[in-house]
Image (cartoon, rainbow, N blue to C red):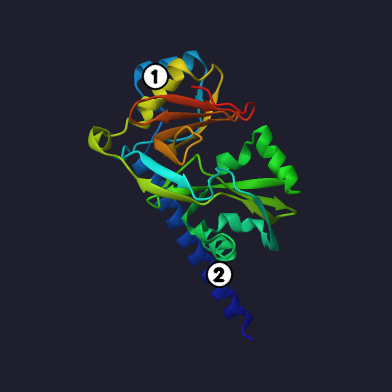
Amino acid sequence: MDWGRAKNVLIYAFLLLNLVLGYQLWNDVREQADTSLDFASLSESTQKVMKEKSIQLLCQIPSITPQLPKITYQYLNGENIGPQIGLEDKIESQLIFRDKDLVSALKGPIPQIGNYQYDPQGSEYMTKSEMERVKEAGAAGRFVMHALVDQKWPLFNDQLELFYSEQRIIAYRYSPIQIVTSGTGDEESQKMMPASNALKTLVERHIPPGSAIKDIQLGYYGQVYNSESQIAAPSWRFTLESGEMYYVQGISGDVTVTSPKSEKEKE
């Protein structure tokens, strides 16, 4: 074997790989810059309040303001939290980061999983009842996924929980849903408030001093009632480092807070 030639081939292969990865990283950064705003883009009054209250912004501010209607959805089993189901064939948990592999591995027991999206923020923080569900499954933790509206926007109320132990998914829990778009009239034609406006409302009236905002995401959220049909509205979700999540309704501006320290929602 010509080792010198083989060595040159390997060097060229690594250089090509680095070029491809470098281009992909540059493209991702460029796309993020096109769809996000930074701290300096906020109004002077908002920046002033954040500095006075020592509120940190650790993420980009989405610049998109799509026109989205409210939706109705139904839990097909009549319950918002389904029964825990163990997996006979354990799934390697790192698949959660490779969507196609995850869907392929779990589409048998969970046919709808192709329409779910992984939520790293929801997976990190748990309420007492959620911790109890992890214990009940004999797991070390859980991954959270949300059903997508129009294959794009996560429905934060809906959770598919994947319980893992020793780096393998061992059980899951979810309640299949049916989503129906229902916006009509004036509400459907209204454009959502920008994330920067929602942030202004939060820092001025809701977020406590010394907080750090680590994630901002657009999706759907609404109170869950004891009825056959539920309603959710397009909302901005702001996640703090402490685990609190603030949902700002994109049209009305109403604010709802959830905390891992409490089972109750606050408005």
Is 196 displayed left or right of 55 in the figure? left
In the picture, the disc for residue 199 is none
Q: Quadrant of residue 62?
A: top left
Query: Of 48 and 75, which appears nearest the observer?
Result: 75
Residue 228 vertical placement versus 55 (above, below):
below
Residue 177 vertical placement versus 202 (above, below):
below
Q: What type is the residue that disc 1 sits on?
A: Thr
Q: What type is the residue that disc 2 sits on?
A: Ile
Is 168 displayed left or right of 213 in the figure? right
Query: Of 23 and 152, which appears nearest the observer?
Result: 152
SS type, badge 2: helix
| Image coordinates for residue 230, horizontal then vertical, percent | 44, 39
SS type, badge 1: helix
Residue 49 vertical placement versus 20 (above, below):
above
Q: At x 48% / y 22%, what residue is drawn?
A: 267
Q: At x 46% / y 41%, what residue is drawn?
A: 228
In terms of sequence position, does the residue under pointer 1 or pointer 2 come before the other?
2
Check disc 1 and report the residue beneath it: 46
Residue 178 vertical placement versus 36 (above, below):
below
Query: Of 178 and 134, which appears nearest the observer?
Result: 178
| Image coordinates for residue 111, horizontal then vertical, percent | 52, 61
Is 57 displayed left or right of 162 in the figure? left
Disc 1 vs disc 2: Cβ atoms closer than 8 Å? no
Check disc 2 and report the residue beneath it: 11
